[in-house]
Image: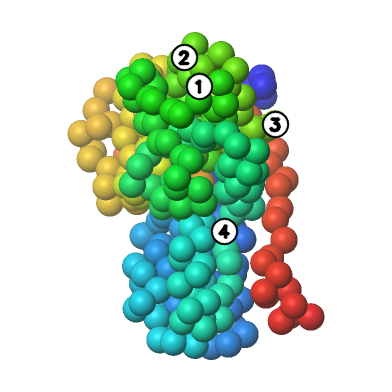
Amino acid sequence: MPLKPFAPNHGAEKKIFLLKPRGFCAGVVRAIDVVKIALDLYGPPVYVRKEIVHNKHVVEELREAGAVFVEELDEVPSGARAIFSAHGVSPAVRDQAKARKLDVIDATCPLVTKVHLEAVRFAREGFSIVLVGHKDHDEVIGTLGEVPDRSYLVETVEDVDNLVVPDPARVRYLTQTTLSLDETSHIVSRLRERFPLIEGPHSQDICYATENRQMAVKAVSDNVDLLLVVGSQNSSNSKRLVEVGAKVNVRSHLVNDRGDVNPAWLEGVRNVGVTAGASAPEHLVQELIEFLREHDYQQLEEIELVDEDVRFSLPSELTITIQ
């Protein structure tokens, strides 16, 4: 997908290249809206299992509004209202919610739900399922929980080399939605070498927002000396943006907000690229821009790769109530 034309900075003035799309994806917008609407409809407390999205600023804002974040459902009073995060949950968690008679609102991103449904379908058809992802990520934990007896997690090419499945002729693969495109392609290529009959989903699992943000970093890489990615340390897609920047030889840093920027990073830097992971609020980006302006980066150009117009409807539990 070609980048829309922009003007490289050949002058002496310092410049910010602000990448677009950046920040909230449709799944994150939906998940945050779910918590806010639930608080408006029912009042606090509303319990949220895990972080609704992986950003500490978002979580803190919702906590101040009355959301109560818990690690597991046994921390939620029986019969209370609970929200599942955008990253999805396993059937075991859903069963626990039923046993505790919780009033559940499911904020799972529809693109994550797609992966869960694919896992169930592949298992029903008798295939072993190889999931490419990071073992401690909430999304992966939920996906593996759909069919744990048929699922195998791989994180690296080496994991593929060591993989043993019951029937090498009956294997399917899925991926976490927030992975690096390049890294995932290497792993999938190795899977195809080891299991020539393997197939994946009809459409890729890596989400549109992850892909768009990574492609924008690559597209601007020849024109920036430093890349700053706004996002939390536990945000998979934000960390992947830093990795993509590094792989195209741009010094890259992940920052929660402007307070994380070391001014020493800016020494000798004329052009700074700025982007944000899919769970990072725009106000943090603007605060970072202001910080850079305070350090003499007065020129700013917004570089747009593609116009994102994806929207997801609210969960049925909320739409029925609102109607």
Which secondary structure lies at badge 3? loop
Circle 3 residues within 10 Å: few <14, some 14–19, many ≥20: few
Seen at 58% across and 87% down, the residue is: 42
Residue 274 is marked as: none
The residue carrying mark 4 is 108
Q: Which residue is mark 3?
A: 202
Residue 168 placed where, x, y %?
Answer: 50, 21
In front of the other: label 2 or label 1?
1
Q: Nearer the viewer, residue 263 or 201?
A: 201
Residues marked 2 and 3 touching at CB (< 8 Å): no
Instruction: Say whether disc 3 or disc 4 marks the residue closer to the N-terminus.
Output: 4
Give amino acid for label 3. His
Q: At x 71% / y 53%, what residue is drawn?
A: 311
Extreme-right residue of the structure: 323
The label shown at residue 194 is 2
Q: Residues within 10 Å of mark 4 (few under 14, many from 20)?
A: many
Quadrant for the C terminus in the image: bottom right
Question: x, y percentage for residue 68?
Answer: 40, 77
Which residue is disc 1 drawn over? 168
